[in-house]
Image: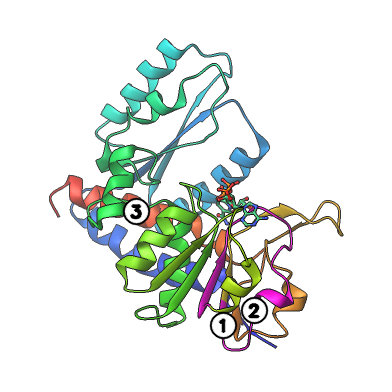
Amino acid sequence: MAERLMGKEVAAAIKEELSSKVAALKDKNITPKLGIVRVGARPDDLFYEGGAKKTCESIGMDFEVFEYPEDITQEAFESAVKDVNARKDVNGILMFSPLPKHLKEPEIRELISTEKDVDCLTVGSQAKVFIGDKTGFAPCTPAAVMDILHHFNIPVAGKKAVVLGRSLVVGKPLAMLLLGENATVTICHSRTENLPEVCKDADILIAAVGRAKMVKANFVKPGQTVIDVGINEDPENPGKYCGDVDYNEVAEIVEKITPVPAGVGSVTTSVLCKQTIRACEMQNGL
Ligand code: NDP
């Protein structure tokens, strides 16, 4: 049976390191602050927001929610985001998406300066990830995957990494982060031929497709590390959720695997805080 790579363990290690960073900043009379921009009150957003608040509090960071009604106009929302971005005390900004359909999301995203764009919403931040500029912030989920690999000392350089999914939020930036650490990266998507065979060839297989339990026993082989980014409703257990990997089948074969829940999802808010603290340090010339 595979070793379970528990996200909680990674998050605890990150938070321990961050607590001392926050304490050091507070000694200089600086308190890092995360600002969350939320339109409406979608349950998923509120759930993530609650987790982010708890993480901020646990390490001594400040946290503020900027909440707007669902019928806010483009003009009013643009002005609000500009104001949040201009706030000196807000070091990192997370804006929940998707925004209501009447709002022009691409334009609004660009109102966040790259220095505060701790979840890689802007084209400027994406470009930094692409060129490997370390002053930029990758989206929190791919960054969390890298933290999991690092924490469990899973070698990346020279290894074959297969990324299943090519979204701008997960698959593409993750491929860039892996490439930046000298993995040999293959990106798969819905048009990839012989998908199980391609996945089977990986040393590290990362699933980010949004299809419940799609990765089955025929996608894997002994010795692999499997990271499951997926969050899906579990078709076999209503009210519960599951990953993109069929855990029971795959864990019988591979060497290491992240569970869902309690895997990647448990690490993302710690990464969000880490990136906000880094943003705060850079904004203060540290
Ligand atoms: P998207 O729907 O944006 O992208 C899915 C990708 O998977 C696409 O590139 C798509 O290919 C590919 N894909 C879909 N079906 C197949 C298939 N049958 N075979 C091969 N490839 C396929 O999803 P996201 O990247 O936003 O999210 C992926 C998963 O990760 C979701 O379950 C989501 O809930 C979860 N997630 C988890 C987070 C966390 O913190 N743990 C955070 C963000 C997302 P194509 O491009 O060809 O359409």
Residue occupying the far front of the picture: 193
Secondary structure character of the magenta stretch overall? loop
**Mark closest to the chain's N terminus, 3 or 2:** 2
Q: Is residue 58 visible?
A: no
Between 87 and 158, the one lying in front of the other is: 158
Instruction: Describe residue 151's horizontal placement relative to residue 72 as left or right.
Output: left
In the picture, which quadrant includes the C terminus?
bottom left
3 and 1 marks in contact (CB < 8 Å): no
Distance from disc 2 to disc 1, alpha carbons, whole Å, reads 7 Å
Disc 2 under 8 Å from ligand 1? The reply is no
Question: How far across and how far down the image is residue 72, in percent?
Answer: 52, 14
Between 57 and 39, the one lying in front of the other is: 39
Query: Residue type at mark 2?
Result: Val
Residue bearing the label numbered 3? 275
Label 2: how many Cα within 10 Å (few below 14, some 14–19, many 20+): many
Label 1: how many Cα within 10 Å (few below 14, some 14–19, many 20+): many
Viewer-nearest of discs 2 and 1? 2
Which disc is residue 224 wearing?
Answer: 1
Please say whether residue 20 is one of the residues in the magenta stretch. Answer: no
Per the image, label 2 sits on a secondary structure element best described as loop
Residue bearing the label numbered 2? 220
Instruction: Describe residue 4's horizontal placement relative to residue 89 as left or right.
Output: right
Q: Is residue 166 above or below residue 150?
A: above
Query: Residue type at mark 3?
Result: Gln
2 and 1 marks in contact (CB < 8 Å): yes
Per the image, label 3 sits on a secondary structure element best described as helix
Q: Is residue 234 visible?
A: yes
Which disc is residue 18 wearing?
Answer: none
Residue range corresponding to the magenta coloring: 202-225
